Amino acid sequence: MMRGLKKWRLFGLAAALMAFLAACGEEQISTLQPAGQVAEDQFDLLLLSTGVMVFVIIVVSIIYVLAIIKFRRKKVGEDVIPEQVEGSKRLEFIWTAIPIAIVLFLAVPTVAVTYQLADVDDMGVVDAEGTPASVTVDVTAKLYWWEFAYPDLGIVTAQELVVPTDEPVYFNLTAADVKHSFWVPSIGGKTDANTDGVNTFYLTFDEESADLEDGVFYGKCAELCGPSHALMDFKVKALDEAEFQAWVAAMQESTGEAEGELAQEGQELFEQSCIACHATSGAGTTGGIAPNLATFGDRNRIAGYLPHSEENLKKWISEPQEYKPGNLMPDPGSLPGREGEAFSEEELDALAAYLFGLTVEDDM
């Protein structure tokens, strides 16, 4: 008796915990708090399907309970056999027609919204002066980071996507190595990044990210892609039109030059060991072996997930495989001119000073 009671208590606790956790979520990463029109349309479909399923469960449960009550043995006796309805054309029609109606009720709006969200006919459209009417971003997923190129603007960044609010932003999505999946939960559902084709779609950002807890929306890779799949994050900054244009101008003028004696020492060391893989100017082309670092000082994470601090940067540079297994960043000892030697503490201080000085927001 006590054992059964404990089991029911455990079940009740688990059910209450599930109900409580179902409401958990933060605005910058929750599908239940949409911050764009695409996410809102998808959320409406979610509510519609959930409502239909709950309605079906309620109806079936009511029929089940009524059947139990009406035909319980204590009420009708031992020898009573309920009316047999096998072969009833009326019932056959009902339990065939109702599921078809439910499927159609769900399918019509789902198909309509799917085609609506796949409409990218306005991508690349220009006005009378030849200026693109909307922003287009070429997204390339790589192990385990994201590259964002703006072909119409001539700039490239990585790990942190910057977009304007209150207008569609179009994306060309591909993968450089294995299959990945692009997902910003608060803004829209995931889209696969394939190595053998380009997926096109659009998203809208209705809220500026500056008011969020971390100042960014969180993006994820939603396709298992290797040992560090769970760490393949990126961030999204949504700015108003004026701030976005100021950011674009600052990126186009960025040079990657250091200011200050220690930062200049770090730049010299960086150009000896790291420049072959990393670009430090936002103006340029795509295809970098490693992330573009032009906005490194403006980011809020190291390697996509570590808190943005000098201590974590030094750890990441010294032991990249320790913090993101399977990534392609080499150990310091294998870099040109290092001859197996790790960076000294003084060299790490200089590199940190240089990298944290790579910022474009100070120029906006």
Image: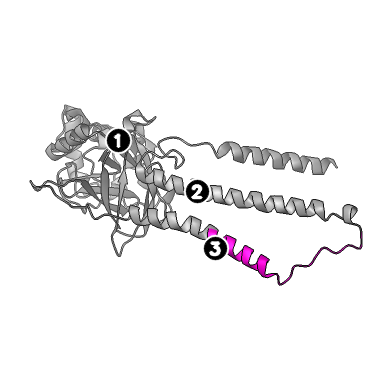
The x and y percentages for residue 225 are: 40, 56
In the structure shown, which secondary structural element does the residue marked by tag 1 occupy?
loop
Above or below, 23 relative to 191: above
Q: Which mark is residue 100?
A: 3
Q: Disc 3 and disc 1: Cα gap in Å? A: 51 Å
Q: Quadrant of the C terminus?
A: top left
Q: Single out the mark in the foreground, 1 or 2.
A: 2
- Residue behind mark 2: 48
Where residue 346 sits, quadrant-wise, is: top left
Label 1–label 2 contact, CB within 8 A: no
Three-letter amino acid code at disc 3? Ile
Q: Is residue 96 above or below residue 209?
A: below
Give the camera-side residue of 205 and 72: 72
Check residue 84 for magenta coloring: yes
Q: Which residues are magenta?
A: 78-101
Question: Does residue 337 appear in this view?
Answer: no
Q: How many residues crowd mark 1 within 10 Å: few (<14), some (14–19), many (20+)? A: some
Category of crowding for the residue at label 2, using alpha-carbon neighbours closer than 10 angstroms: few (below 14), some (14–19), many (at least 20): some
Name the residue tied to disc 1.
299
Numbered-mark total: 3
